[in-house]
């Protein structure tokens, strides 16, 4: 087996082998523009080979393997990720520019946790059967056999590359599916490192395959339009989800989509303000605002508006932008210069729309080679309302608009006035109000007095433009398996 660890070479992983592609493209660091790796782009022929390999592995043992065998292998994968913890940290940080501390705290531990959690879910899944008794005296025993969906296409973005990849691969494999993974062109490294782990753990060749490349007219499109796949699980932009849905519509394949958001936080005057402002600083700025759950709209009850705005602006200015290996760094760059162009266009648009800028608003002067990176200042706006594009469209950067409200009903109405529906946060010391407001949010995930606190068994996903379906615990099992009901007349 050729190694992925040849300096700067990232290869596809098909049928247990690392293989070259039709061309290579450069992956550059968002920190300073330096070359991170050369990535082998899969052509249609390689995607075909990956789907064939996944089909063969599915039908020659993986789908029929015992649950015990599969979960044992998944737990072994988790163990090896933990043993190679620092390899994953280095690879993830090199691709994304994230501070090492953040990757150590969040991304890599979650990858191992994903494999353990779904191994537990599948290992403990119950058998359900029930008796049917009809008026005419007949009775029957019904039971459902859950079978793997089949060959699953897994297409993921760049913001939490390993976390989001393993969030899908772990349940898919534990349920007996095989996968062809298409990581983002911006973050090819950790999916490739995971291939080494799969091989070492003893996961059979063809069960886990990786094809690198872009979306349209490249590996992403070749994979999602391939007739040999049985379903697509996708995380990314809502527009891309729509394209993929069209691609699989003709053959009516199941999809699970985790898409974009324009998430709201609502802060009531009775909230613990220190906690609320700390929480907001996290939900607006974590990972440079590049988490789908990040807050981009902050509705604040009018009497505390100035205090919340001042507190959040102070925390924005306290963030330390810098190199990933500097222990003082809290905030990395955006993923790429291209993404920065998009975020900058919203900074300009906010000005045109009449926003007041109370923090940030531009490109920081960090000096030296960092000036070639994709840096942006954490930015807060006031003076906007729900009619402005800046408040309606997903920016996916460290930005938020602060908007006052006067009543609870108005807060709920403003928060729900969006085409998206992923996540919301309510800050209040009134528990009744917390429950009442949280339930009225038209979203998949509604937090009270916290943000991004996760139990991996809970349903994760969004409504409206934010997605289709839920993943997590048994919800993932519903997507990654198909039940066949057997009815036996007694
Ligand atoms: P993206 O949609 O541009 O790309 C995601 C993946 O899809 C990449 O691997 C890309 O190469 C591939 N792709 C692009 N076009 C394709 C096509 N036509 N056919 C097949 N594959 C294609 O998203 P991104 O820029 O990588 O990620 C940012 C977006 O992801 C944001 O909108 C963010 O909100 C969303 N996101 C959502 C969640 C969630 O859980 N809801 C989580 C993370 C990110
Ligand atoms: O924590 C998770 O399981 C998850 N799917 C997070 C998604 C974050 C979006 O960027």
Image (cartoon, rainbow, N blue to C red):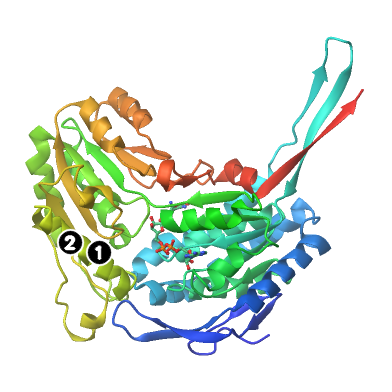
Say above or below: 146 vs 33.
Answer: above
Q: Which mark is residue 343?
A: 1
Q: Is residue 334 left or right of residue 306?
A: right
Secondary structure under the numbered disc 2 in the rendered image: helix
In the rendered image, the residue lying farthest to the front is 250
What x and y, as percent, mark residue 464?
42, 41
Check disc 2 and report the residue beneath it.
Answer: 347
Say above or below: 88 vs 168.
Answer: below
Quarter that holds the C terminus = top right
Figure quadrant of residue 315 = bottom left
What x and y, as percent, mark residue 205?
73, 72
Q: Is residue 137 left or right of residue 303?
A: right
Secondary structure under the numbered disc 1 in the rendered image: helix
**Going 18% across and 30% down the picture, which residue do you hit?**
270
Q: Which one is in front, 307 or 470?
A: 470
Q: Which one is in front, 103 or 54?
A: 54
What x and y, as percent, mark residue 283?
29, 50
Label 1 to label 2, Cα distance in Å?
A: 7 Å
Res. 80 in view: no
Q: Residues within 10 Å of mark 1 (few under 14, many from 20)?
A: many
Quarter that holds the N terminus = bottom right
Q: Which one is in front, 429 or 238?
A: 238
Q: Which one is in front, 258 or 371?
A: 258
**Going 51% across and 75% down the picture, which residue do you hit?**
213
Q: Is residue 488 left or right of residue 161?
A: right
Res. 473 in view: yes
**Ligand 1 lies under 8 Å from the Cβ of mark 2:** no
């Amino acid at each position: 087996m050729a190694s992925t660890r040849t300096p700067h070479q990232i290869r596809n992983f098909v049928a247990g082998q690392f293989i070259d592609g039709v061309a290579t493209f450069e992956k550059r660091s968002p920190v300073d523009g330096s070359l991170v790796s050369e990535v082998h782009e899969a052509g249609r022929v390689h995607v075909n080979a990956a789907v064939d390999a996944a089909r063969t592995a599915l039908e020659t043992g993986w789908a029929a393997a015992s649950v015990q065998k599969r979960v044992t292998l998944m737990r072994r994968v988790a163990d090896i990720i933990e043993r190679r913890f620092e390899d994953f940290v280095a690879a993830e940080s090199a691709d994304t520019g994230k501070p090492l501390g953040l990757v150590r705290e969040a991304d890599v531990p979650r990858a191992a946790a994903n494999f353990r959690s779904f191994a537990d879910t599948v290992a403990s899944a119950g058998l359900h059967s029930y008796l049917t008794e009809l008026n005419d005296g007949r009775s029957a025993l019904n039971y459902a056999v859950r079978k793997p969906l089949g060959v699953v296409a897994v297409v993921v973005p760049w913001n939490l590359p390993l976390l989001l990849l393993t969030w899908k691969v772990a349940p898919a494999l534990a349920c007996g599916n095989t996968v062809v993974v298409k990581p983002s062109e911006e973050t090819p490294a950790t999916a490739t490192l995971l291939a080494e782990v799969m091989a070492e753990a003893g996961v059979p060749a063809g069960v886990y395959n990786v094809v690198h490349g872009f979306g349209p007219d490249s590996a992403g499109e070749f994979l999602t339009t391939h007739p040999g796949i049985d379903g697509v699980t996708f995380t990314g932009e809502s527009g891309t989800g729509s394209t993929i849905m069209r691609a699989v519509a003709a053959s009516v394949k199941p999809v699970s989509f985790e898409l974009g958001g324009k998430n709201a936080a609502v802060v009531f005057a009775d909230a613990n303000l220190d906690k609320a402002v700390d929480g907001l600083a996290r939900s607006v700025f974590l990972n440079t605002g590049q988490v789908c759950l990040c807050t981009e709209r902050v509705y604040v009850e009018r009497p505390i508006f100035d205090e919340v705005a001042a507190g959040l602006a102070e925390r924005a200015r306290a963030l330390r932008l810098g190199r990933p290996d500097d222990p003082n760094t809290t905030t990395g760059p955006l993923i790429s210069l291209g993404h920065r162009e998009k975020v900058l266009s919203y900074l300009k648009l906010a000005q045109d729309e009449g926003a007041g800028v109370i923090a940030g608003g531009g490109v920081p002067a960090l000096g030296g080679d960092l000036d070639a990176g994709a840096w942006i200042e954490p930015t807060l706006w006031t003076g906007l309302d729900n009619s402005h594009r800046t408040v309606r469209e997903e920016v996916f950067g460290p930005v938020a608009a602060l908007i006052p409200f006067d009543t609870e009903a108005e807060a709920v109405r403003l928060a729900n006035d969006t085409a998206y529906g992923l996540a919301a946060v309510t800050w209040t010391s009134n528990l009744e109000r917390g429950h009442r407001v949280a339930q009225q949010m038209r979203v998949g995930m509604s937090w009270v007095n916290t943000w991004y606190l996760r139990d991996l068994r809970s349903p994760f996903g969004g409504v409206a433009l934010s997605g289709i379906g839920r993943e997590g615990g048994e919800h993932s099992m519903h997507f990654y398996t198909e039940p066949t009901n057997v009815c036996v007349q007694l």
